[in-house]
Amino acid sequence: MIVANRKHVQELCNMFKGHKRVLLVGCGTCVTVCLAGGERETGILGSAVRMALKLAGRGEVVVNECTIERQCDDAFFDPLAAHGAEYDAICSFGCGVGVQALAERFPDISVYPGLNTQFMGLLESQGVWTEKCSGCGNCRLGEFAGICPITRCSKRLLNGPCGGSRDGQCEVREGLDCAWQLIYDRAKAIGTLSKIEEIALPNDWSTALDGGTRKVVREDQCIAGLGPKA
Amino acid sequence: MSKYEPLILAFCCHYCAYAAADLAGSMRLQYPNNVRVLKLPCTGKLEVNFILAAFERGVDGVFVAGCLEGGCHYLEGNLRARRRVERAKEILSEIGLEPERVDMFNLSSAQGPRFAEIVNEMTARLTSLGPSPFRPARGAEEPVREMTEQAEASLSGENHDCCQS
């Protein structure tokens, strides 16, 4: 899932300078699960922003909240469409995708991010999420015993470890596991050490963000004659 | 000018603090009458937005009273509540409101005198902090009563939408 965390209340208030009516829009998927931008968190930030604006002498600014099923799909914006015109600013409590989707759907209204989108990750323990995938577009996890060196090695080494690996820890910061130690341990445990003894070929980064904005098209799912956009 | 009396909302656990408040009454203990008690089935029911909603409606302070640590009927509801109170304090600081306006206490149902003591302690603290800047001109009583009714309706299973849209 996409993991995000909230912005400081004062940062949100500063973003809304010059606006009279602001709608905070929560998202019911990833950011609800990572406790950043679902119905409850949007409600909390809504209360906080209203009170902070009042203390700053801007109590006349109307701040309302709502949460939609999903912000990364235009179809779920329909319930919002009727109310969008009542506001001069929208603040998305979705990931960066949601912010941009709202900006596309409401071209005449200022759209702001309510969250800082962090990474694609998983729940490590209650309240703790860790990064696992960089979305590089060319998955090679099979070569590395199911542990991604591109995301989890601080140097993104495909042939590791480096000299900064000490007792299974990365030198970058305390408590950070060395991805290559994890790869070695797991490969040994499952009997595939020979795989990591081979020199891994350089990565083709053109499939990652370096190759420009990416697009996935499933022609068989596109409605005939209407093109991929439909 | 009339004397400032802080309005306090108390989220009390059904199993301990609520019974302690009842005991304080039975024992004829005297404590300030400016506290409004809202019963929760467990303080684990508490959410951060309950606390913020109370401040938004104009209360001067909030306290959450749950079972003694290790004594929660739902094992860890009171521990969760403590973390939520800490988070509420953090958000209040970001807003610019004193985090001391909200606090968490633990007591058992047999501690009626402790309940009275907590109310006295919070009243003294809020008196020194002064009224909340969100206290409505018409008095905070009415919005708090509305919130209490809404919360009670919600807890009894009626539909209640706490979010504005």
Image (cartoon, coloured by chain):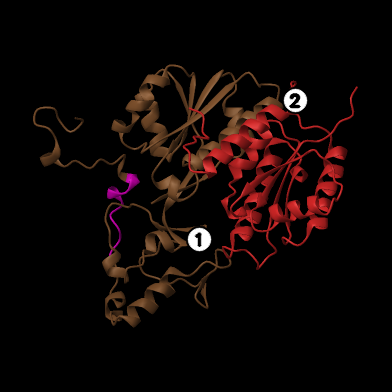
Chain colours: A brown, B red
Q: Is residue B48 magenta?
A: no
Quarter of the image where one finds residue A158: bottom left
**A204 up-or-down from A201: above or below:** above
> Residue A31 at what x, y percent from top left?
44, 45
Density class for disc 2 (Cα within 10 Å; few <14, some 14-19, many ≥20) is few
Residue A83 vs residue A197, the one in the foreground: A83
The quadrant of the image that shows the N terminus of chain B is top right
Going by the image, does B151 lie left or right of B133? left
Q: Chain of mark 2?
A: B
Please name the residue shown 90% across and 29% down the image: B3
Please name the residue shown 28% across and 31% down the image: A75
Toward the left, the furthest residue is A224
Span shown in magenta: A201-210
Q: Amino acid at mark 2?
A: Gly
> Residue A196 at what x, y percent from top left?
31, 75
Q: Chain of mark 1?
A: A
Q: Mark 1 vs mark 2: same chain? A: no
Q: Which residue is mark 2?
A: B139
Q: Which residue is mark 1?
A: A126
Residue A172 vs residue A25, the one in the foreground: A25
Going by the image, does B123 lie left or right of A160? right
